Image: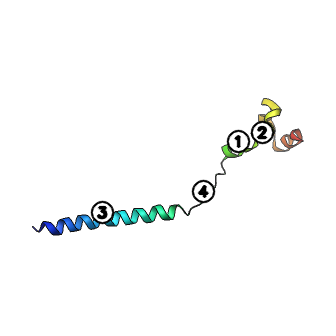
Amino acid sequence: MHWSYVIELCACIVGVHFVLFAAAVYTSRLVIIKDDTMISTAILLKPSVEHLGPRATFLAGKDLSEAIE
């Protein structure tokens, strides 16, 4: 068995994996992730409805908008 071929093959496999990993990291930086979950919306609205107290959790959207005004 020619060990030089085995070492070259292993080095090529590791090299290709590293290049693919670097490409995946580079392209993942370009992705924009928008956080539009219910929790982020609640965090943004908390200062507006904090003065309403616990009753604000049971109000509908229209009732909530009237109570804020």
Point out residue 52 in the picture as x, y percentages from the top left corner.
83, 33
Q: Residues within 10 Å of mark 4 (few under 14, many from 20)?
A: few
Residue, x 19% and y 65% (percent of image)? 7
Residues marked 4 and 1 touching at CB (< 8 Å): no
For residue 68, which quarter of the picture?
top right
Earlier-in-chain disc, 4 versus 2? 4
Residue that mark 1 sits on? 43
Within 10 Å of disc 1 (Cα), the crowding (few <14, some 14-19, many 20+) is: few
Q: Position of residue 10 (x, y in %)?
A: 24, 64
Q: Amino acid at mark 2?
A: Pro
- Seen in the image, is 42 located left or right of residue 56? left
Give the quadrant of the C terminus: top right
Left or right placement of residue 27 versus residue 37 in this view:
left
> Which circle's residue, 2 or 3, is located before the other in the chain?
3
Disc 4 marks a residue whose amino acid type is Ile
The residue indicated by pointer 2 is 47
Dot 3 crowding, Cα within 10 Å, few <14, some 14–19, many 20+: few
Query: Residue at position x 60%, y 56% from top?
Result: 33
Q: Secondary structure at mark 3?
A: helix
Crowd rating for badge 2 (residues with CA inside 10 Å; few <14, some 14–19, many 20+): few
Q: Secondary structure at mark 2?
A: helix
Element on which disc 4 rests: loop
The alpha-carbon separation of the residues under discs 4 and 2 comes to 25 Å
- Mark 4, residue position: 33
In the rendered structure, which amino acid carries the disc numbered 1?
Ile
What distance separates the C-alpha of mark 3 from that of mark 1?
45 Å
Spatial CA distance of label 2 from label 1 is 8 Å
Residue ID for mark 3: 14
